[in-house]
Amino acid sequence: MPPFKDEHILLIAPGSQVTLAQLGLPESFTPAKFRFPTRMFPAEKKGEYEPYKIRERRHEVKVSNGIHAPKEDVEMKDAEPAAQEGTNTASVTEAAEKTENVEETQKAEEEQGNEGNEGPKQETVEEVFYEEDVASDEGAIYPLENGRIVDWPCFLALLTHIHNTLSPPFHTPIIIIAEPVWTARDREAITQFVFEKFKTPAFSLMDSALAVCYGYGTSTATVVDVGKGKVDVTAVTDFLVNEHGRGIALEGCGGDYMTDRLLELLGAKGFTWEMCEQLKRSNITELLPPGTPLPGAAATARQGNNPAASASTGAFDGQAQTENVPRGPGDGTQTGAEGGNAEGEEDEGVLDVAAIVSGNTSEYLAQREKEKADKSASKKGAAEQNAKATRLPNSKKEKASFQLEEFVPLQEDGDPKNGSGRFTRQVRDIEIGVERFLSATPRSKTEDRLSNGILEDIATQIHHTILAVPDATKRSELWDSLIVVGNGSKIKGFTQALLGTIAQKFVLSPSATIFTSEIPSSFSTPLPTGGTNTPAPVNQPGLAHNPGGHGVNPLLVAATHANNTGAPNVHPGTPGMDHSTGLHYRSTGHSQTPTSVKSLKPPEYFSEWKEHGSSNAPGASGAGSKPGAPGGGPGGPGGPGSSSTGHGLEEAVFLGAQVAAKVIFVLDQGINKGFMSRVEYNESGPSAIHEYAM
Amino acid sequence: MNPSIPPSAAEYGGDEVSAIVLDPGFSTTRAGFAGEDTPKSLIPSYYGKYSSDGQKKLIFGDDVFVTPRPGLSVHNPMGNDGIVEDWDMAERVWEYSFKSKLTGPKPGNPFQNGLNDIPDGELPSEMEGVETDEKPLADSPLLMTECGWNPTKAREKTIDIAMEKWGTPAFYLARTGVLAAFASGKASALVVDIGASNISVTPVHDGMVLKRGVQHSPLGGDYISSQIRALFKSNSPQPITITPHYLISSKTAVDAGQPPQVKYKSFPPERTPDASYRSLLEERTLSEFKECVVQVWPGPNKLSAISPNGVSNEEVARSSPGRPFEFPDGYNQVFGVDRYRVVESLFDAKAAIPDPESASPAPTQSQTVPELIKAALNGVDVDIRPHLLANVVVTGASSLLYGFTERLNQELIQSFPGPRVRISAAGHTSERRFGSWIGGSILASLGTFHQMWISKKEYDEHGPNIVEKRCK
């Protein structure tokens, strides 16, 4: 078999929401080029599927007019929303025009209604045409549910659709990232399908947790994959996935939980699920480490915000009284921040509090004149407020606002000024109180779990998973190399809050982990007893009052923190272990864990991923969208300095897939059984994939 | 190869399905494909039961350890002696063990739960090779394991479930002792299996169990746990209570031996999980304790004996450095000689830590490991005894206690000074834990397995009693 080329490798990473795919490995590995929504729509013919909702439209068209938008136009609209958004990325004046548009639309609608009544007097032709409605998810079938394949025909249709879209040549090896929840039989079925349908010369099925490890360039790690509805916790040691004790598809712990919780908190205030989802994705929603007081208790937090807000919004009436209520729609208000925002979910310009328009559209119209006059003033105010607010991180502010973006369907097509849009996009700012920090707290409704929110569930699962690793000497390393990935973990502060939860519940105190001999604990400064072969810590009087002690035996603290002093008291003979484990290393190698818990540093050598690495910018679940232009808004409060459309390292699984593909298809070429070749498939059948599956 | 030319149409023809090996134990149930080196699926044999919104719900798998549920109670379909008591639930637990990771979706998928028929022609042609049968094992031969003292009724019930409920086309029932011997590459061996609820000694000769020699006693891992609990009760400076993690909201580091500073969680009484759940989770902490702290006195001689140089063994043990352990509530303490005492009664019944409240009665000397081995050897032909002693296979998760094999070796050398004693115990943790499963994996992947198994047709002809004739 001729060697495989970089540009021929097809990578597919299915997820419950989005399936990442790419043909070919670029010079430097990039985030996935294609993002397919993991859904299909039943086609006309039973058992077949279409990638988009197909609407049958019967349309009465005036022949003379010819404005019935051909479907290319509809596609254009979503494929390049930037163009469409150009219209409502608007100054106030443009917004005004738009409102007029709305009026026009209404008029047109009335006319249409009249036409209907009058019957086919005018020259109209009834035309049936099929339209791909790319925005709709009505009637969609999601073949993956919590990672599990629930609809096989649909899932295979999706694979076929992806394969057709990327249309690789025949000499294309395929790598698919397997969800941990897939059973052995599932994997065999996929193998059979790929070989027999796509005629691929080589196929590899790689475990998602392992792919993450490849992405991070580590051989041992605890991978926590936070998805939409589930969490997977996997301990990987020496590039081997530990199946026993693995946390597979822990249900109700993913991103949806947080949205549900926000809805529970804010539902009374008129929030819908969609709004909560956007709020969750905005950068004001944050998880605080356990024990952090919520802002608002402190008066200082209040001062930072309110005076500024009232100063800047003073121009508008009724602003101050309605602090907590979601503002009415302010169509096309000053939203310079969200320029070419393709996905429609990454709003960074949350500081445009000054641009909030209260009341509904009619009120807005009434205010319009006044606004024009105040425009310059308010701009100044906004700038002022920006400056003030950025001084306080989001976590210290009692209230913060985010931009809600809605697609409001227009009744009528063919509004000439609005392009072909059947939807109009509205942007409004909504101010949220401390609820935005509570998205991971336990729900008040009777749930069938007793834990303290999802973080505790995940922490418990991590504890269980690591303790189930048979090689006890690896456990300490596993605790120190936690990798949190998955789009559900994008919410700001997730990893830190998780680490905090683990520290609070599971991390051992120094006195329990240090190798001490039996000394009555009433002795305040125990000395190593003689006559034992205890690798006793070197007593360093200078450290007796280590501030890190917190009432714990200072000697023990000194010993466990010995590295800070550079004291060479690490027990010899335990190379490669970190200092704390080195000290209490025992002959059996069985020591209690965790003594510490850390997250693993992401790799820095892939610039495309690095840019987005620190970003909390919410991602798009949208259809095959290409990365839009950055929002270009002012830095969010306490948020990342620059906005991005980023799919960063929470999708490290795809980076890992590329690394692995390069290794197994191009460098290794099957010597180490990294993939199954067609010849081997023909000989041994699909069940042999387990020998190759990574 | 030209990338634009489709490959030739040679395609895979036959469908060789490897057998499934199911090894149900008291503590865990192992399942996997024959020919593999570890079981893909390892689940606790315990299952959880609770009701939510008026509906009874069951939890299988590891989730029972992870998520506390309101009013959750924990049960085990196995009896303490390793014989199934609750057949309905045993079937469910076993089915979960292979369904969850091996053969198909969990219960709830309408295609697989046996409630729905799939109309023909609904599936696209690519799906023809994919199973949509109602019965979970319709295309996999099954090898199951049983303990050496499994009664006839239980064996017949097992084949009944496999054939009728799971629809397996071929079935075989093998004894754990034989399989553990196979796993260490021996056809004849004396298998010492230290499990959770039981320890057993099985003499195996040429792949056959010598029934008269099979011995078992309840001094398994759970007994050691009860000894540890007894130790905690009498602990100084204060008795130790184990508070599982789910009852703790946060803890603060405290000095060794100091009372814990901890924030507990409180549940309303109607939502509080059952005591059985708490004790299961306490067991988790205890197994961590066994891993990190407990140590078997390596010998020679008992812990209570005096060593040749006049110092008592206990004194020697005392002088070796202690081991710290922290409990979920933050309480921590160093355990010295006590960590030897909790397992000493496996070898010396008199050393048992008395606990009047404990459910398990105090052990008798005949239940200890050395006595079981003696009794087993007395039950077999005198000619093969030396051969068995030269092939002692130690398996079972509880045999992983630090120092266990060294001590056993010392005991055997003392009891049988004549013949050569050789212990073989797998060094790898998983090989030791899954000894009988691995043996099953070997057996079921042999070409001769086809001649051993009971086919569906034979079962239909002869009924469940065929298992007595064929699986000896």
Image: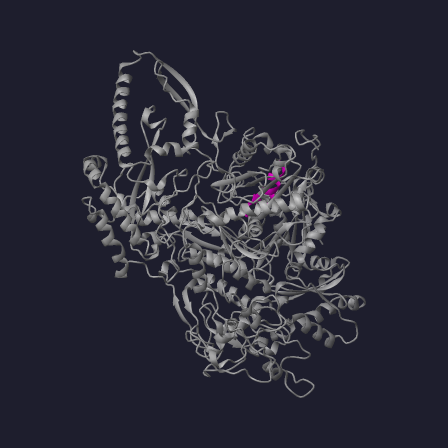
Q: Residue at x 36, y 52 (%)?
A: A446
Residue A424 in sight here = yes
On screen, B380 above or below B236? above
| Quarter occupied by residue B67 | bottom left
Identify the image quadrant of residue A26: top right
* Vertical comparison of A97 with A611: above or below: above
Q: Specify the quadrant that holds the N terminus of chain A.
A: top right
> Where residue A306 sits: x, y (%)?
24, 53
Range of residues picked out in magenta: A177-192
Q: Camera-side residue: A382 or A19?
A: A382
- Residue B301: % across, % down: 68, 80
Residue A526 placed where, x, y %? Answer: 49, 82
**Is A525 in front, or is A562?**
A562
Report whether A313 appears left or right of A534: left
Instruction: Please state if B9 lies on the left or on the right of A517 as rendered.
Output: right
In the figure, is residue A321 to the left or right of B135? left
Residue at (20, 47) in percent of width and height: A314
* Whether residue A494 is situated above or below residue A14 in the rendered picture: below
Q: Can residue A689 be seen in this view?
A: no
